[in-house]
């Protein structure tokens, strides 16, 4: 009987080992491979999504750097334009002041020339009136008609004494 128990046990043991091996291969074929395939696909998809996120972040950083560079260029352009506008305004103001100064000088010169001309005209008119009056007075005093030569001599003498 001891022999029989041991033969039955050995047979049961072998059957159990065969059942375990068959179950292992069936489980591996039916469950392990599909689950591993599913996990590998999921792992690949997660890696791709992670890489896409990293690429998107790098792209965003590049765009941000580009935007910052454009902003800096715009600021520099703005500063240059403001500086140029200020320089133009100062130059325009200098030109306006120079023109105004020149016009003021011209006006002063014209006024001085006009005053000199007016003075000379008034002196000439006064000389003419005085000469006419002197002619009339001398004609009345002398009792005869005075010629232009006499008139000229009297006027020269009078104006010569008046100027001294």
Image (cartoon, rainbow, N blue to C red):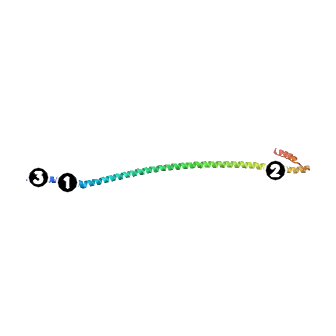
Disc marking residue 7? 3
User: At numbered mark 1, what does the secondary structure look like: helix, strand or loop?
Assistant: helix
- Residue that carries the numbered disc 1 in the rendered image: 22
> Which residue is depicted at the point 24% across and 54% down?
29
Q: CA distance from mark 3 to mark 1?
A: 22 Å
Q: Position of residue 131 (x, y in %)?
A: 85, 49
Which mark is nearer the camera, 2 or 1?
1
Instruction: Specify few, some or many for label 2: CA neighbours under 10 Å numbering under 14, 14-19, or 20 or more.
Output: few
The tag earlier along the polypeptide, 3 or 1, is 3
Disc marking residue 127? none
Q: Position of residue 46 (x, y in %)?
A: 33, 53
Q: Nearer the viewer, residue 72 or 23?
A: 23
The tag earlier along the polypeptide, 2 or 1, is 1
Which mark is nearer the camera, 3 or 1?
1
User: At numbered mark 2, what does the secondary structure look like: helix, strand or loop?
Assistant: helix
Q: CA distance from mark 2 to mark 3?
A: 171 Å
Say left or right for 133 vs 100: right
Residue at the outermost right position: 143
> Which residue is depicted at the point 32% across and 52% down?
44
User: At numbered mark 3, what does the secondary structure look like: helix, strand or loop?
Assistant: helix
The tag earlier along the polypeptide, 2 or 3, is 3
* Residues marked 3 and 1 touching at CB (< 8 Å): no
- Residue that carries the numbered disc 2 in the rendered image: 126
Q: Position of residue 64 (x, y in %)?
A: 44, 51
Q: CA distance from mark 2 to mark 1?
A: 151 Å
> Which residue is depicted at the point 80% across and 49% down?
124
């Amino acid at each position: 009987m001891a022999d029989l128990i041991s033969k039955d046990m050995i047979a049961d043991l072998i059957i159990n080992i065969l059942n375990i091996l068959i179950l292992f291969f069936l489980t591996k074929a039916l469950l392990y491979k599909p689950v591993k395939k599913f996990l590998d696909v999921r792992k690949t998809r997660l890696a791709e999504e992670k890489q896409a996120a990293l690429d998107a972040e790098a792209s965003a950083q590049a765009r941000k750097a580009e935007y910052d560079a454009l902003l800096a260029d715009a600021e520099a352009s703005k500063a240059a334009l403001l500086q140029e506008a200020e320089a133009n305004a100062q130059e325009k103001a200098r030109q306006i002041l120079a023109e105004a100064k020149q016009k003021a000088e011209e006006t002063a010169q014209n006024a001085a020339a006009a005053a000199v001309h007016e003075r000379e005209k008034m002196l000439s008119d006064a000389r003419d009136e005085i000469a006419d009056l002197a002619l009339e007075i001398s004609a009345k005093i002398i009792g005869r008609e005075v010629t232009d030569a006499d008139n000229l001599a009297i006027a020269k003498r009078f104006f010569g004494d008046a100027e001294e």
